[in-house]
Amino acid sequence: MTNLIDLTLSDLVKKIKSKEISSKEITSVYIERSNKSKKLNTYVEQTFDEAIKNSEKFDNNPNFNKKLSGIPLAVKDLFCTKNVKTTAGSKILENFVPTYEATVTQNLWNEGAILLGKLNCDEFAMGSSNETSYFGNVISPIDDNLVPGGSSGGSASALAAKLTPATIGTDTGGSIRQPASFTGTVGLKPTYGSCSRYGIVAFASSLDQAGPMTRDVKDCALMLEVISSFDPKDSTSINFKRPNYFSDLNKNIKGKKIGIPKEYRVDGMPTEIENLWEKGKTYLKDCGAEIIDISLPHTNYALPAYYIVAPAEASSNLARYDGVKYGFRADGENLIDMYEKTRSLGFGDEVKRRIMIGTYVLSSGYYDAYYLKAQKVRKLIKNDFDKVFNKVDAILTPSTPSSAFKIGDKTNDPVSMYLNDIFTVPVNLAGLPGISIPAGLDKNNYPLGLQIIGKPFDEQVILDIAFSMEEKINFKLKTNDWWIK
Amino acid sequence: MSKDQYIIEKNENKYEVIIGLEVHAQVLSESKLFSTSATKFGSEPNTQVSLVDAAFPGMLPVINEFCIRQAVKTGIGLNAIINKKSIFDRKNYFYADLPQGYQISQYKDPIVGEGTVVLDLPSGPKTIGIERLHLEQDAGKSIHDVDPGSTLVDLNRSGVALMEIVSKPDLRSPEEVNLYIKKLRSIMRYLGTCDGNMQEGSLRADVNVSVRKLGSDKLGTRCEIKNVNSIKFMQMAIEYEANRQVELLEEGNVVDQETRLFDTKKNQTRSMRSKEDAHDYRYFPDPDLLPLVFDNQFIENIKKEIPELPDQKKNRFIEKFKLSPYEATILVSDLDTSKFFEKVIEKSDVKLSANWITGELFALLNENNLEINESPISPENLSKLINLISDGTISGKIAKTIFEIMSKEDKDPNIIVDEKGLKQESDPKALEDLIQKVLSSNKDKVNEYKSGKDKLFGFFVGQVMKESKGKGNPQIINKILKEKLNG
Amino acid sequence: MPLINYHMSIDLKTVKHISKLSRISIDDQKAKKLEKDLNAIFKWIEQLNQLNTDKVEPLTSIAETTLRFRKDQIESKNIREDILKNSPKDNKDYFVVPKVVE
Ligand SMILES: [Mg+2]
Ligand SMILES: [Zn+2]
């Protein structure tokens, strides 16, 4: 029998349901391994004692009709969890304990999952390397000086290091797909409006979506099925008939038309990525899909537009962190002084930089030149996708323009850091679903991912395509547990 | 140029005052605009605050349909354009009682567009333009005077729905402002969209004031006086501010466009913020909300709920009841007054009822500083009193006595008449006896009368009345007296 | 049609103004660093000016639906204790902040 820790989520669910293993058994295995993996700095809050208690409670009175019966899970610390500290990776929320639960995490617990703890992330999800967290950077299990990507870096790292059988992250400009790509795991950003934003610490409201991060595509479908729901508490949540992503998952993609956008062939992209992309096309053809060359002419403008829209929304979303109601407060002589000191000491440099960008682009005299312009560009990008989706069922691209980089490599050059999200950001701007699956390794043996982009609410289509490709790619994530020794 | 124009004269220059109002009217609703907490006034601090109202991380707004209907209803009452698509924006600024760090409001695309309100000026009707009406959230309350070192914040109000009603700069005097606010309040109370209670802050206004030389058609620089919460203070603030601006101009200075506060202790306006720290609200569409869209049917359904409004009611009173425009205006100005009136006239004479309500009853209420719905005399009992006069049971004079008694104890006037024996004496036989008695004891006066001193007739009436202890029916007394004296 | 390609440079004064609007105090050294960073970022952002968007409608919301309405019902109870629990200054009735100076 394989090691328990190596079981995928869906296998684990089966084994618990067939009573081959107990919830406490598997919970203890994950806790033990997590305890040995402090070096990766993935957890900001551990709820191990509670988890053991909950697993015992499950075992004493098991309900096997749930989708995640007795499964321990750690989640990104951007989800508010009732009575469990929630920080969003920021000093300004250092001691914040919500009295409420995010809808997506509640969906997990409703299906029988058990909280293991909260995973590190870039501060307020602003970053692509998990180096902006107040609680220190996260290390990738791939290599000891490598970033796991961001902002769901703690989630990606914990998943790849097998400290949780699956996890959820949030994706505003690539924060699920880019770290998944960097760590050889699967990450899906659902269509905007699929997963409720209620109880998720907001970064950029019109772009944020929660999504699953898993070891394989099957697990991804299972997790999506659990977390995707219509929520009346979120005005942007969309009420549509959600498929049974997990039970409907299949490899029949014969006749599907897959677009290859020429604009994603960018200068300086390593040939390994180019080759991987070619290989992806071959696999798809082998599965009976049709490859079609397409054009998304405004792709280049997505990233600069994103760096107007996202900071603008963030500057306003983060105004509530003012030291009055919760979190960190610095002393001040008067109210304004208190505000200025609290926010100066409470936020990290990247967050402050983005608040400043956002404040500037919305300020009087600049709104039309920046914010309005960006919303128009966003429309053009959306139109690009709408047009090609008349011809194709999905789009295949690389997930990132490079593999994971070294810790500290890009911290002094914001723009080069931002460029990391060049392939993922257009998907958020257009509100589309996108999945990143591991597709191979580069010359340093660092994982590389391919991204499949779908039409709105076509998660099942991209999952099926990913499922078919996964079999052909046959990627095996190998880490030698170096951080444990 | 009409007499009632408000003009400021200085150094032989004449100035007129241009006023525009931004009225904040609290929407009458059970729950808040974007959250499900209660809107009740006067509750314990922070007991009507949800996680949304206190802007906890991850909390999201969900709009209250009733508040939208209330805004549309008000728009219809203001004869305004209803916009089937409108957008909620964020107005960003930091303040202790603004937990989100922004107010959700409507900026470029409000729910209601241009409309009108008609004022009944002594010189005739005047139409005031409405620029727009939009929905927005109220802020919490900062309490500065309890704790010497700190400010306390109560968020009970935070998130309560407000309608901001912006007028065109069509108002020209403190008196017009008085009439405008009262008319607006009256319309909203008829509609049931705002209770108009200024003491509780349900209605307050930002007052924009500028002055210009009479005859000029160019608007001067305006100052905005923030958050004035009584009509009296609005009027005082306008007078002070207009005179301050005239003074500045006459001294060759310019008026700075700024936000000012009305200091109710000094009766002065003062500058609120330095220009350096001028607000930049960074409005942008709220990404947590989608466009607010409804169809014609939605508006049509609301139109069906619109009651008779003050102007219509006034016309009906004039046409149907033949009331004077003056009486009608007074009787419809307040919804409760009009209801009181209509209750009384269900069973009583209209003209007499109008007289008694606008006369005796209003005087009584004024004297005791009471609203009509606090009237010590119920409409039912007032109606009975009026009927006692109409059917001759009591005289107008006795009626006043009974009214006086009723004002202390809301009792059926029939009972008072019985108990106090105040019933009018209309039996000709009984009255004839009294008259005979008076004439017999005043023979000399009778002779004087008969020799031509007609004026003495009043004296005999008075004497008979006195004998009847005020209860004699004057018409019958007159009739018999005339027969006796002239016969 | 000629496309505008300009860069509005952000000076130190602007940086300080933005920091004031954002209610984030910054010292001179930080301000200088930010001036440099922001200029680099905006120079990059302004490649958007190569694009003529005169006839493009801005995208206001990505979800192509309209606002859903809620019934006017009170569902939230008195949760004062929960609301004030995380507050940095202890008070059982109110949020407490330093004195506001007008
Ligand atoms: Mg105003
Ligand atoms: Zn307002």
Image (cartoon, coloured by chain):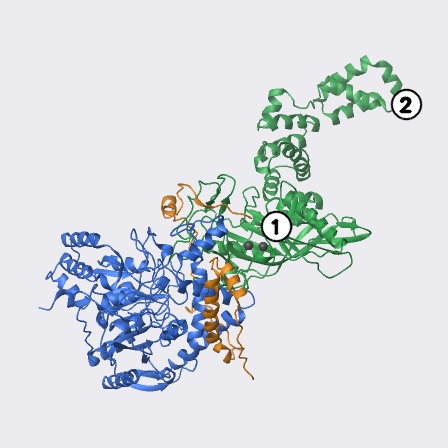
Report the side of A280 relative to A319 (left or right): left
Identify residue for label 2: B452
Report the side of A164 relative to C23 (left or right): left
Label 1: which secondary element: helix
Please rate how many residues cluster around mark 2, counting C-alpha atoms within 10 Å: few if below 14, some from 14 to 19, many from 20. Answer: few
Which quarter of the figure has residue A209? Answer: bottom left
Report the side of A166 relative to B375 (left or right): left
Chain seen in green:
B
Q: Chain of mark 2?
A: B
In the rendered image, the residue lying farthest to the left is A1
Q: Position of residue A233 (x, y in %)?
A: 37, 57
Residue B184: mark: 1
Tell me how far mark 1 sits from mark 2, CA to CA.
62 Å
Query: Does the beta carbon of the residue at mark 1 sit less than 8 Å from ligand 2?
Result: no
Q: Which of the marked residues, 1 or 2, is nearer the chain's N terminus? A: 1
Badge 1 amino acid = Leu
Badge 2 amino acid = Gly
Residue A251 in view of the camera: no
Report the side of A328 relative to B376 (left or right): left
Q: Colour of chain C?
A: orange
What residue sits 45% from the left and 67% below the top?
Answer: C33
Are dots 1 and 2 on a single chain?
Answer: yes
Chain seen in blue:
A
Residue A399: mark: none
> Quadrant where the C terminus of chain A lies?
bottom left
Q: Is residue B320 above or below residue C25?
A: above
Which quarter of the figure has residue A170? Answer: bottom left
Q: Nearer the viewer, mark 1 or mark 2?
A: 1
Q: Chain of mark 1?
A: B
Which quarter of the figure has residue A157? Answer: bottom left
Count of numbered tags: 2
